[in-house]
Image (spheres, coloured by chain):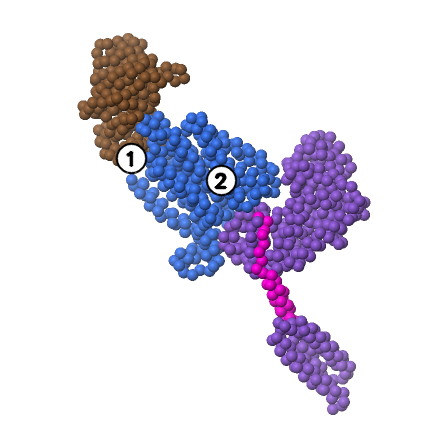
Chain colours: A brown, B blue, C purple
Amino acid sequence: MPCIAAKGLTFKVKGKVIVEDVSAELCGGLNVVLGPNGAGKTTLLRLFAGVLRPTQGSVLIDGAPPDKVRARISYVPAQLSLDPMTRLVDLAEAINYGKDGSWRKRLREYLSALGIEWAAERRFSTLSSGEQRLATIAAALSRGGDVIIADEPTEFLDVSNRAKVFALFRGLVNKGALVIIATHDVRRAGQADRVLVLSRGVVTFAGQPGEGLVEALSKAYSVDAKTLLEA
Amino acid sequence: MRAERLTLTLIAISLPLSVLLSLSIGPYRSVDFPVVIAALVGLPVSRLSLDVLTYRAVRTLAAGVLGAGLAVSGSTLQFTLRNPLADPYLAGVASGSLLGVTLALLWGRASFWDLYAAAIAGGLLTLSAVITISGLAGGGAVTLLVVGVAFSYVMSGLTMFFMIMLGPRLPGALYWMFGSVAFVTLPLVERTLVILVPAAAALAALSRPLNSLLLGDEVARAIGVRVRLVRLGSFALASLITAALVSMAGPVGFIGLVAPWLAKRSFGVRFSTVLWASAAMGAEIAVLSDVIARLVLFPSEAPLTAVTSVFGAPLLVYILIKSRGE
Amino acid sequence: MSSVQRGLSAALVVLLVVAILLSAYNTVQLAQLERQVKSVSSSVGSLNSTIQGVSSRVSSLNSTIQGSIANVNRLSEMASALGSELSELNVTLSGRIASLESQLTQLESEVRFPVTIVDALNRTVVIPSMPMKIVTLDPAATEIALAVGAGGQLVAVDNDSVLYLPPPFNDTVHEMVANGSLKVISSTYSSPDIEQIMALSPDLVIGTAGWGYNNYIASTLASYGIPVLLLPSSESLEDVYRAVIMVGEATGHVNNAVKLVESMSAQITAVERSLENVSYVNATVILWINPTYVAGGGTFINDMMTLAGGVNVFQNLSGWPVISSEDLLQANPSVIILVSNGGLFNASSLYQWLNSTIGPAYVNIAAIKYGRVYVIGGWYESAMSEPAVLTPMAVKLLAIILHPQAFNLTSVPQLITPSTLSPSLLANQG
């Protein structure tokens, strides 16, 4: 089981603080990061994946910084702006930089797990937003890493597809992977092993889903608990 | 897959056909298709026919090299700058070459090789300046684009400034204003290939990291691509190719923009494939354009750039419309 | 038979014998021709005159015999038949002599070939034997080639040479094109075509360096073994002389070339002599109006102006600078010479441009104040703008405009064309 350890993680851009003093240790399991828009979820995930370097503090994956263990990390970005003629396989090939050709097999597996095997050779821009999301997930997962960091993986997805994605992640966790997801989908929080609530760059809750979670969430989202649960 | 195979077959058939066509067409009508076949098969033909055929062959070769090179440069820039509208002249290399030639003419140089050297020097200096300044300003894709375009305008402006002083020596510079393969000699092609082949090989070696740039700088960095190095390096190599080609035959537009598009349409966005596919398509477009240039105003010749622009622009619009519709 | 008839028969027999003997003699001589060409030529010449004398004596003898004596008629018929046979023989012989003479000239020149010339771009051009299929690429080259006598060796000229040569060269070119002995290739300025030139299999191509695409044509053709001679693009009179000598050497007419250069420089010297005591006049030559181009320093026209006793008010600007009306006002030339560009411009075009930019102040320009604005048209324009064989004429033209009194003229017309100012005035008087 891979462990990711963040200590005093801070990220500033031109003096503006995006993420402040985040410390957490996540070992295996399905970890969900919640928080309103602008809370810093994307930045936090990027820091975990090694896409950004922290201004202060450190991130270690099993004791090593992310850029030393790139091969183990599968990062699913929230958005991709691609050349209109990029095909799904091209995206997957590009993501698998530095890896051997076994990604093709893994890609096919994940594509069928998500029900979009037919999209393999298709142009990314011809897929619907939901299908694009699924495709990006499958492409990132084809890296075959055991540390999966996904930013808004269920955006644009309908209910059944959301379920599929979470089932996929759960399956990976069962095989010993560490999965960290940032999402707005508050209701999925119940299925997580651990939840982090981020509000204005600061972790306001870290632990298993339960009572304290609802409170923390209502504070973070500035709505009352009832509205939150009904949403 | 079917589309890919179809395209491959099409290229494999049409390239040799275009070459044959190019050898058979020209103002000296006595050297026509039967003569070409006779010469290729080894039957004796007159000395004059051989000379004319050699001339046409060198021309065709030059067009092929030109088209392939521009396509390689254009593809590279489109990948490295993540901009499907990038073309080989982004770094201001063509304007720099023209400025070099204008200055050389002003300083009394007139022989072709002197001017050729000045063209290359002008292009390389401009390229170095663009890379250095962009590098200092961060080396991002947008920076390169903006600095390149800015230099392009500066060089053009300076050139206009100096050209007025040229007076009757102006025609000497025309060669580098209107691209043409009519005067390319074999030694010239050889010199160009000396630059082109290693540069293209280097780009081929950079295929994988260059390809991964399509994910965006941040994700690319996350998966281990040395983004700045790859971007600046590929930009430099692509513009080097452009400089060599502009010095050989003057600026010829559109091929560097259209060939990569066509390749991507048929084979997807995968640099190692697009590299050679666009080269083959670019070579073919160039050879056919040269044939059209010789036919359109027969027996006079139209400038090559005019043909590629007039036929290239509608083609580009067509591609755009077709891809948006999907 | 009477003694007259006997005499006549004897004369005829003698004539026949002489003729036959002489024919035999000449035939033998022809076989040994290389050493005896000159003597054959003079022998035939004297034979010819002898025969003519005899033939005319026979005719006069014939006319004194009155009456219709059959013998006399037969005699006269035989005499005229003989006369015509002899003149045919003469014609054949003269023709053979002429072709032998040209072969001799060729032999003479072949003694000079192969020729190695270093041309205007420092390229070494080797011409292995006397070129008989010459292609010229621009009007200046055509003009010089014709002037040194290589017209018969030309096989094609460029389109601009057909359009823009001054007389007498344009007539020569038009004639040769009309009778098919000269082909026309497309202009090397606007639409150069390598294949057209190659198709003519030329053994020499002559063009002015830097004109149109000539330089590129030269480097391309060179790789097919075709010698291309690039003439210096004239920025001074010396360049023209060099070009003439180069063409003379290349085409096997060195003597003519040297004579041409001598005559050209003699014409210039004559002009100089006429200008011995005049003082220099400030002048400018305007080549185009709006944008207004003038001839600056270091140009050919500048040189010509100096030789013609003028000072170019714009000589501190080099090349072909564009000037504003203010510049003209400031420079204040005493004489303005405008090139009409085929009738496109005249004096009023100049005044209009000046008026629209600096208003009525323009009348203060000395040349305008004193009515010394001249427009050059007709083929005089080519002579002015194309530095070649007719340059001395152009220099004299300029000298006449600037200093008419030095040439015993009271005034010069404002519009100067071959019809208003006769070319004979510009002709050479050594």
**Residue at image coords 69%, 49%:** C391
**Residue at image coords 34%, 22%:** A52
> From this viewpoint, which residue is outermost toward the left?
A174
Quadrant of the snapshot with the N terminus of chain C: bottom right
Residue C101 falls inside the magenta stretch:
yes
**Residue at image coords 43%, 28%:** B135
Subunit that carries the residue with mark 1: A
Q: Please tell me whether the stretch drawn in magenta is mainly helix, strand or loop.
A: helix
**Residue at image coords 64%, 48%:** C239
Relative placement, left or right, of A220 versus B168 is left
Relative placement, left or right, of B43 versus C30 is left
Question: Where residue C207 appears, x then y in whole percent?
Answer: 59, 51
Tag 2 and tag 1 share a subunit:
no
Q: From mark 2 to mark 1, how far is it between C-alphas? A: 42 Å
Q: Which residue is mark 1?
A: A121
Residue A126 in view: no
Relative placement, left or right, of A13 versus C50 is left
Q: Which residue is mark 2?
A: B120
Q: Front-most of B297 and C249?
A: C249
Q: Residues within 10 Å of mark 1 (few under 14, many from 20)?
A: some
Subunit that carries the residue with mark 2: B
Q: Amino acid at mark 2?
A: Ile
Secondary structure of the residue carrying numbered label 2: helix
Magenta stretch bounds: C93-121
Residue C78 placement: quadrant: bottom right
Question: Where residue C286 appears, x then y in whole percent?
Answer: 68, 40
Secondary structure of the residue carrying numbered label 1: loop
Question: Where residue B16 appears, x then y in whole percent?
Answer: 38, 49
Q: Amino acid at mark 1?
A: Glu
